[in-house]
Image (tube, helix red, strand yellow):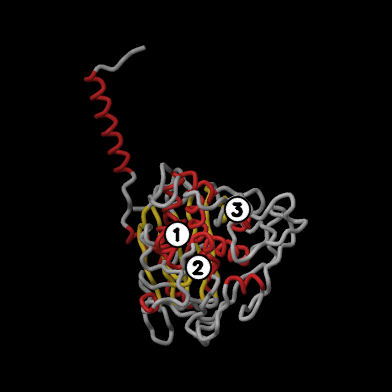
C-alpha cells in the first residue's frame, strides 16, 4: 500500500482547501433583495391564475390585512419581512417582530418539548401514558388491552382519541377551563369530552384532545406552569424571544401582536381568542422564531446534534409512525423530489404554515391575520419555491 509523504499530505490538504473554497464560492448565498423582488412582483412567465398579481395585490385579492414571512436557506434565516397591517382599525404595520397566533403549529413545538423530556429520561414515547398521568387517566377498555395509549400515538393523532378537535378558543372576558375540565367536557369547556374509540395505531384522526392529554402528562411530570417550562426547556435555548405559550398573552407580546380578522378582512369582536389548550393551539410567535424551531430540527437531523435535540431525537420527530402522515408532532410528505416536514395552523382569525426540507436546509414560515389566509400562504410558498429553485439539481439559484 502506498503511503503519503509529509509533503504529499500537505499538497493534498492545500488542494482540498482550494477545492472547498471554490465550492463555497460557487454556492455563495445570493442577495435576498433580488429574490424578494421576484417573489413580490407579478410572476414571469405568467401561467395565469394569480401570477399576474403583485404581493400587495394578492393581499387585497384574498382579503388578508397582514402577512409575515421568514425564509430559510443553508440552515439559516435568509430573510424575513412583514407586509400589510396587524390591525385594520389602528393601521399598525406588520413587521418582523409582530406576533401571530401559531394555532396548531403549537403542536409540533410542544412535541419537541416532549421529545426533549424523553431524551432526558423523564418520559417515554412508547410506554403507557397513564404511567405519567397523575390528575386524569385513560380508562381501561378493549381498545387498550393489547397496546396502551402512548405519547407517540397521542402526538401522531393515532391514539384512538375520537374528538377531532379543532378548538374554537374563548373570548378574553370569558372563564377558561382547566385541562381536566377540557378532557371531561365539563363547563366552562366549550368542546366535548375526549373519548377513545379504537386501538392505538389502528387509524388516524386529528385530535386536539389527544395533544391536550399529552400536555397534561408533561405538566404532571415536570410540576411547573406550562408556559414557564416551555420558556426554559425550548423557547429560551432556541432564541425564540418573541414567542410564548402564556394564555392570555403578556403585555410585552400584546404590544406588537396581530389582531384576528374574518375572511372578509375585518375585525369582529375581540382582538383575538384565548386558548386554554396551550400545547394544541396556544403559542404566540413570529415566522422568524418558528424558522428557528425548524432549523433546530434540520441541524439535529443532519447531526451530530442541535441545540436542544440529539440526532436520534430529531429522527423520532421525522419518522412516521406507520399509520397516516404524522411522525411525532410533525407531518411529513414528499413534494416533487424532496421530503419535507410541515404543519399548518388555523385559529379564530389566524392562518399560518411551516414547511421545511429534511436535508437541504431550506424552508419557509408564513403567518397571516385572516381566516382567508390559506390561499395567500399557498401562493407565496409556490413563489418562494420557484424563486429559490427548490429540489432542482441543474437549475442554479438566481443571483
The answer to whether the residue labelled 3 contacts the one labelled 2, judged by CB atoms less than 8 Å apart, is no
The N terminus, quarter of image: top left
- Identify the residue at horizontal 41%, vertical 48% (top origin): 299
Q: Is residue 28 left or right of residue 228?
A: left
Distance, label 3 to label 2, CA atoms, is 25 Å
The answer to whether the residue labelled 2 contacts the one labelled 1, judged by CB atoms less than 8 Å apart, is no
First in sequence, mark 3 or 2: give its number: 3
Q: How many circles with numbers are drawn on the protein?
A: 3
The secondary element bearing badge 3 is classed as helix
Distance, label 2 to label 1, CA atoms, is 11 Å
The secondary element bearing badge 2 is classed as strand
- Identify the residue at horizontal 30%, vertical 36% (top origin): 20
Instruction: Give neighbour class at mark 1: few <14, some 14-19, many 20+ (Cα, 10 Å).
Output: many
* Residue placed under numbered mark 3 in the picture: 152
* Residue placed under numbered mark 1 in the picture: 364
First in sequence, mark 2 or 1: give its number: 2
Residue lying furthest right in this view? 142
Q: Evaluate whether residue 317 shows in this view.
A: yes
* Residue placed under numbered mark 2 in the picture: 352
Q: Nearer the viewer, mark 3 or mark 2?
A: 3
Distance, label 1 to label 3, CA atoms, is 26 Å
Amino acid at each position: 500500500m502506498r503511503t503519503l509523504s509529509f509533503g504529499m499530505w500537505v499538497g493534498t490538504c492545500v488542494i482540498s482547501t482550494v477545492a472547498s473554497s471554490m465550492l463555497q464560492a460557487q454556492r455563495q448565498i445570493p442577495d435576498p433583495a433580488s429574490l424578494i423582488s421576484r417573489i413580490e412582483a407579478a410572476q414571469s412567465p405568467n401561467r395565469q391564475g394569480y401570477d399576474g398579481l403583485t404581493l400587495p395585490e394578492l393581499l387585497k385579492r384574498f382579503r388578508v390585512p397582514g402577512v409575515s414571512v421568514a425564509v430559510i436557506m443553508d440552515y439559516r434565516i435568509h430573510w424575513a419581512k412583514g407586509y400589510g397591517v396587524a390591525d385594520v382599525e389602528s393601521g399598525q404595520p406588520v413587521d418582523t417582530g409582530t406576533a401571530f397566533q401559531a394555532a396548531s403549529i403549537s403542536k409540533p413545538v410542544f412535541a419537541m418539548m416532549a421529545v426533549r423530556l424523553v431524551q432526558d429520561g423523564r418520559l417515554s414515547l412508547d410506554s403507557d401514558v397513564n404511567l405519567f398521568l397523575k390528575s386524569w387517566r385513560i380508562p381501561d377498555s378493549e381498545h387498550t388491552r393489547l397496546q396502551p395509549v402512548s405519547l407517540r400515538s397521542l402526538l401522531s393523532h393515532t391514539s384512538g382519541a375520537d374528538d377531532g378537535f379543532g378548538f374554537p378558543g374563548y373570548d378574553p372576558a370569558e372563564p377558561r377551563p382547566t385541562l381536566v375540565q377540557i378532557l371531561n367536557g365539563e363547563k366552562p369547556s366549550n368542546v366535548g369530552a375526549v373519548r377513545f374509540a379504537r386501538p392505538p395505531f389502528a387509524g388516524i384522526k386529528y385530535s386536539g384532545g389527544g395533544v391536550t392529554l399529552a400536555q397534561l402528562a408533561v405538566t404532571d411530570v415536570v410540576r411547573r406552569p406550562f408556559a414557564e417550562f416551555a420558556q426554559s426547556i425550548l423557547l429560551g435555548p432556541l432564541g425564540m424571544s418573541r414567542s410564548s405559550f402564556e394564555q392570555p398573552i403578556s403585555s410585552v407580546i400584546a404590544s406588537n401582536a396581530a389582531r384576528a380578522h374574518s375572511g372578509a378582512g375585518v375585525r369582529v369582536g375581540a382582538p383575538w381568542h384565548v386558548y386554554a389548550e396551550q400545547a394544541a393551539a396556544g403559542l404566540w410567535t413570529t415566522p422568524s422564531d418558528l424558522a428557528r424551531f425548524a432549523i433546530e430540527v434540520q441541524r439535529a437531523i443532519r447531526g451530530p446534534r442541535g441545540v436542544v435535540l440529539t440526532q436520534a431525537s430529531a429522527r423520532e420527530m421525522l419518522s412516521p409512525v406507520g399509520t397516516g402522515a404524522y411522525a411525532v408532532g410533525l407531518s411529513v410528505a414528499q413534494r416533487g423530489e424532496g421530503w419535507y416536514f410541515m404543519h399548518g395552523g388555523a385559529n379564530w382569525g389566524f392562518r399560518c404554515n411551516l414547511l421545511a426540507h429534511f436535508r437541504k436546509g431550506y424552508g419557509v414560515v408564513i403567518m397571516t391575520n385572516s381566516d382567508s389566509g390559506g390561499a395567500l400562504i399557498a401562493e407565496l410558498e409556490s413563489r418562494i419555491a420557484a424563486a429559490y429553485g427548490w429540489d432542482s439539481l441543474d437549475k442554479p439559484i438566481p443571483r
